[in-house]
Image (cartoon, rainbow, N blue to C red):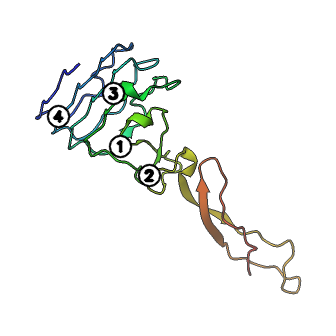
């Protein structure tokens, strides 16, 4: 623990720094990056290979005092950690004194890990999928809040309303919103001549 403690010139962390670490032990990452005031973001999947329940004080103050650490906690940071019977003392003050987000930005949704009670109000977010790239900023909780705009074509009536003549209809569309795992909510209209 305390490996990079107060390394004030450390600006970034390689995503694969702990890729070979899979187990957990007491105070393992305690104060590892604490006081690294030039650190600006968390890489994707930093602790993703660590499996099971976090050990006692395992992440105690890991990033505490990293005053320039901004953005959100990537969804896969603690990917394999077990939050069952999670004791927040294992992560006491892990993100205390950082400038990490407390709400997810637009284009993302809040990724719930079960470990949030120890994060000093900071949030883990995941990007909305390419098919539904939009979301409203905030802690909207699920991927189902990601959306895209959509259109539906008008429906041609079965008969021409102009004295049984041949009709040419305008190819009108209605616009709406399609949320992830839902259909377009645009109201389909009858085509007009």
Q: Secondary structure at mark 2?
A: loop
Badge 3 or badge 1: first in the primary sequence: 3
Which numbered disc covers residue 36? 4
Marks 2, 4: nearer the viewer: 4
Q: Looking at the image, is 178 positioned above or below residue 5?
A: below
Q: Looking at the image, is 122 positioned above or below residue 193?
A: above
Marks 1, 4: nearer the viewer: 4
Residue at (33, 27) in percent of width and height: 46
Residue on which disc 2 sits = 107
Q: Residue 91 versus residue 9: which sits nearer the camera?
A: 91
Which numbered disc covers residue 72? 1
Residue 82 location in percent, x, y?
49, 23
Badge 3 or badge 2: first in the primary sequence: 3
Marks 1/4: CA–CA distance = 17 Å
Q: Is residue 109 left or right of residue 22?
A: right
Residue 168 location in percent, x, y?
74, 78
């Amino acid at each position: 623990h305390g490996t990079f403690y107060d390394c004030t010139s450390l600006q970034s962390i390689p995503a694969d720094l702990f890729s070979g670490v899979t187990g957990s032990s007491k105070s393992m990452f305690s104060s590892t990056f604490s006081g690294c005031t030039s650190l600006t973001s968390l890489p994707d999947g930093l602790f993703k290979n660590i499996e099971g329940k976090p050990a006692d004080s395992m992440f105690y103050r890991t990033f505490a005092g990293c005053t320039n650490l901004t953005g959100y906690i990537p969804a896969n940071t603690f990917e394999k950690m077990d939050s069952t019977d999670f004791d927040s003392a294992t992560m006491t003050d892990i993100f205390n004194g950082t400038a990490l987000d407390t709400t997810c930005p637009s284009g993302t949704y809040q990724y719930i890990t079960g470990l949030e009670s120890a994060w000093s109000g900071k949030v883990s977010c995941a990007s909305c999928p390419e098919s539904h790239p939009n979301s409203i900023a905030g802690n909207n909780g699920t991927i189902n809040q990601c959306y895209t705009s959509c259109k539906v074509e008008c429906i041609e009536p079965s008969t021409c309303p102009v004295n049984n003549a041949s009709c040419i209809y305008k190819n009108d569309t209605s616009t709406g919103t399609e949320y992830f795992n839902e259909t377009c909510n645009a109201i389909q209209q009858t085509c007009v001549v």
